[in-house]
Image (tube, helix red, strand yellow):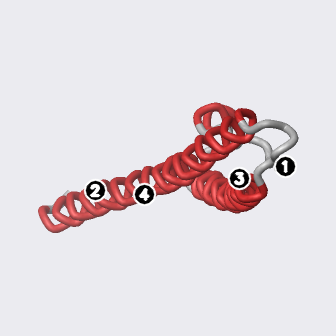
Amino acid sequence: MNSRSKMRMREQSGLDAEILQEMAEALGNSGERVQRALARLQESLSRINQIRESLEREPKSMGSPTLEAMLEKEVGLYNSLRQEALEQFRWLIIHREALGIRNHAQVAEQYPIPPPMKS
C-alpha cells in the first residue's frame, strides 16, 4: 500500500468517526426532546393535582366554577402535551430505526407516556 492510499484510509476513518459522532449526538438530542416533553407533561399533572386538591377542600354544595374551569383547561393542556410527548417519542423510535436499532423495549421503559386524562 502506498502512502497516498494510507492517507485516504486515514481520511476515510476520520470521516467515519465524525459521522458516527454526529449520529450519536442526533440520537441523544431526540432522547432529550422526549425528556423535555415528559417534564412539561409532569408539570401539568402537578397543576392538575393541585387544582383537584383545592376542589376537594371546597364544600360540595358550593362548588367552584372557576376551579372547575381551570381544571378543564389544564386537562386539555395535559392532553395536548401528551400528544407532543408521543410525537417526540415516535421520532426517537424512527431515529433509532434509521440507525438500525430494532429493540425499543428499553426506550419504552425509560420514557413511559402516561394515558390521556379526563377532567
Cα distance in 3D space between marks 2 and 3: 62 Å
Q: Earlier in the sequence, mark 2 or mark 1?
A: 2
Q: Earlier in the sequence, mark 3 or mark 1?
A: 3
Q: Amino acid at mark 3?
A: Leu
Q: Quadrant of residue 51?
A: top right
Per the rendering, the mark at residue 67 is 3
Pointer 4 with pointer 2, Cβ within 8 A: no
Q: Nearer the viewer, residue 78 or 26?
A: 78
Disc 1: which residue: 118
Secondary element type, mark 4: helix
Cα distance in 3D space between marks 2 and 1: 54 Å
10 Å neighbourhood of mark 1: few (<14), some, or many (≥20)? few
Secondary element type, mark 1: loop
Q: Position of residue 3 (x, y in %)?
A: 12, 62
Pointer 2 with pointer 1, Cβ within 8 A: no
Q: Earlier in the sequence, mark 4 or mark 1?
A: 4
